[in-house]
Image (tube, rainbow, N blue to C red):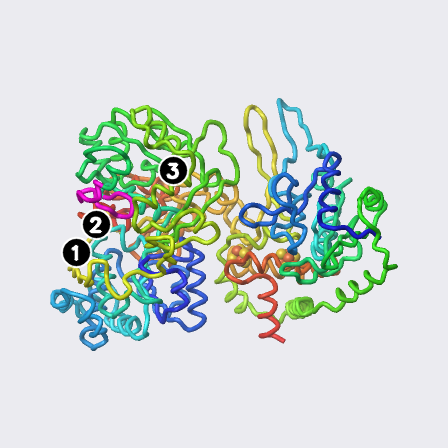
Amino acid sequence: MKRAKTEELKTFFESLSDKYDLRVPVKLHDGTRVLGSLSEGEFAIEGGKIPQKPTSVFFPQFDEMFVVTDGDVAMAKPPAKPIMVVGMTAEDLDCLEFIDKFFAENFRDNIYYNKRDGSVVVGVSGRCGKDGEFMKIAGGKCDIELISDGECFIVHPYTDKGEGLVEKLQADECGCGGVHMEALRKESDALPKEDEETVDKASELIRQGKVTDEFWDEIATRCIACTSCNLACPTCTCFEVYDRERDGKMVRQRIWDSCQLDGFMREASGHNPSGKQLQRTRRRIHHKLAADVERWGHRTCMLCGRCDEVCPTEIGIKSVCREIVKRFS
Amino acid sequence: MTNSISCVEQTGCILLIGSNTTEQHPLIGTRIINAVKKGMKLIVADNRKIRLAEIADMHIRLENGTNVAFLNGLMHVIIKEGLADDEYVKTRTENYDELKAIVEEYTPERTAEICKITPEEVVNAARMYSAPEAAMIVYCMGITQHSHGVDNVKSCANLAMLTGNVGKAGTGVNPLRGQNNVQGACDMGALPNVYTGYQKVVDEASRAVFEKAWGVENLPGNVGLTVTTAINAACDGQLKALFVLGENPMMSDPDQHHVKTGLENLDFLVVQDIFPTPTTALADVVLPAACYAEKDGTFTSTERRVQRVRKACDPPGKARQDWEIVGDIAKRMGYDGLTYNSPEEIMDEITRVTPIYGGMQYDRIDQVGLQWPCPDREHPGTPFLHKGTFKRGLGLFGPASYMPPMELPDEEYPFLLATGRCYFHFHTGTMTRRTRLLDREERFPYVEINLDDAKRLGIYDRFPVMVSTRRGEVKALARVSDVVVPGHLFMTFHFEEAAANALTNNALDPVAKIPEYKVCAAQVRRAS
Ligand code: SF4
Ligand code: SF4
């Protein structure tokens, strides 16, 4: 396997920018890391997960569904260049795997798959997290994984497409015969599992009906309905559809919605089955930890930690789960 | 705010008066919720049953417009029960005797009668507020938007000084400022009586500073018109031209009919804004401006913190930066001195002529902002004001007597109408009503009415009603609940199709000229 320096990776991605719509981690002036092209900021592969949900490259906040001009309907088309997204963590890749499944269930959501089909996904892990933290190794679920050993990245292709691309990467072979990789894998396996255990335990307690409405009410009082938790969550897929007319054209768009809003479930009559904050807060967590377990056979919170980081009132899913476990087990 | 937002975590008690904090300042609201969880006492003095009222130690639903009586009542109890900070009063304040004489009349019984509360509530609130080492008063428009708003503010200050709660962490008199940069606008002299940093135009020495900096002579030494009096002057024909930047007085000023008459009476109206509004509809010239995400510069927060903002995208079409537009107009009028190359250059000038901003150069506020006063480059900024001494030396008690609002309910208009805001819309809705999901949250104009009143009048939840006052009439959906007390109505001014300010009273505070948005007499009935 190849072992590449950060600079070599940058050159590699740069060389692919003709063929791909590149979304790599870059650092903006104010220090924020975002997914963008290399011209938008300094290449910043290290530093942990990207604060914004990386699944937004396939399911963006605003997306055009179709355009109607004089009665002619033009459906949204695939992008001119396939998307190449770099920097997904192991948790992000779990999220992506789930929304791939979600957008293919019952019918294939073409607006999503227009972007997803033909795309290249590059994961990142190892000793390049925030403040040097070790990031879990995914071991698959992407085309290529970049695994940091603290100095360089071991470049691990998992698909044919990935292998084809890595051939063009100018970097030395690792030459250790896999010893290196084995050590990193061990380190990954030894990562603490507290979050996982807490969330699984909370999920169990919710499903057993042990969590009271008084509890949800108490948590819900703190929610200011800013919707950040939903907007940051890579497995949140709800959207609102609306039409915009401009210059004789009608564009139907979809835009991320949030179950924390009153209007999310309100009927035209004004009746609202989720008309109270208690119900909305409960729903947000219940959905991912109980309802989805029934439907998909697993929880749909992949522990990426974004909702906990963005929630201004500290009621992201992990903090609520910790509270649930403390009070109800 | 005299103090910092973080003081919420350092205080023993908050007296919250006239602020719906979780809706209008949600992050501060959250800090209050968290502080209550950790044992901080919270007194909510507000007529409406706001979210914080549910977790408060006391919720006192005093009648709108009776704040002075309520605050005087608290001070009466504090003095009578020996709960004042005598040492502080003696060493840091003056005019105590006058205060004492005036609040003497406000016994718990008399206060309770004026405020329509119980004497016990007055006594208990006084004890609760004065008990801890540090207590804060936090207020908002429920204090200021009255025909006696200045008296209300002074009374808050009196109460804080009486208990030694000014000039240390976790205390203070803390108005929560509204818009992202209303504090900055005031700091920059967007007021009729001051230059930047509150340097008075009537003061010859401050005029000299600006004459020198701008290379001009004879800057006018008279105080200009406030927004509300400018409209009156336009109606009288004394004001001929008006340049409005980023305001929508047709929606935000009291008595819409009066505002329209005034604006139509002008010879020339220029409006600079980011979207068409009912005010741009009346303008002779509309100048498209860049919005917050399209500009570089600073915003100054409610805790006097000057913070950098950075442009995220280019302005659309012909929209330009406010400072460029103003500079170009000045140039065409024959003055080159307002031409700059960048916001940073403007900031440099600000630091040169504004002592409280003296040390606020861009390199110092690049990542984290600083709180004024920050007079020089070595100064770390000021988390709370009046430490050790007040700006004027001793803190002056400015006691006030209770005066009723200008227009009270009567037989013809039996309800008390207050106006305000809701969580999902900002001001006149220019931006938020163009935002899909925010508009979906609150799509229709509404009026809050108490269950008992609704029942008596045959009004049901979400049914259309007509709300009228001596100024006008609008149609809105009834929102029936116990958020308002019987006899009260509450409306927001976000909706063009049912402008609450078609109803409000253009009664002004004699000093600050702020309108009485929180009290007028109204009537409500089923529509058709
Ligand atoms: S941690 Fe929060 S943001 Fe991340 S997947 Fe779970 S619910 Fe979504
Ligand atoms: S981020 Fe927190 S406060 Fe905001 S909507 Fe979600 S739970 Fe509520």
Which of the chains bears the disc numbered 3? B
Screen quadrant of the N terminus of chain B:
bottom left
**Label number found at residue B147:** 2
Structural distance between the alpha carbons of marks 1 and 2: 9 Å
Q: Nearer the viewer, residue B509 or B258?
A: B509
The reply to whether residue B451 is in sight is: no
Residue receiving disc 1: B403
Find the magenta span and give its range: B194-208
Q: Nearer the viewer, residue B281 or A71?
A: B281
Q: Residue at x 36, y 53 (%)?
A: B304
Which of the chains bears the disc numbered 1? B
**Label number found at residue B496:** 3
Structural distance between the alpha carbons of marks 2 and 3: 25 Å
Q: Secondary structure at mark 1?
A: loop
Q: Position of residue A24 (x, y in %)?
A: 68, 45
Q: Is B255 contained in the magenta span?
A: no
Q: Secondary structure at mark 3?
A: helix
Q: Nearer the viewer, residue B424 or B34?
A: B34
| Whether label 1 touches label 3, CB < 8 Å | no
Q: Position of residue A44 (x, y in %)?
A: 65, 49
Specify the farthest residue to the top: A70
Question: In this rendering, would A199 be left or right of B508?
Answer: right
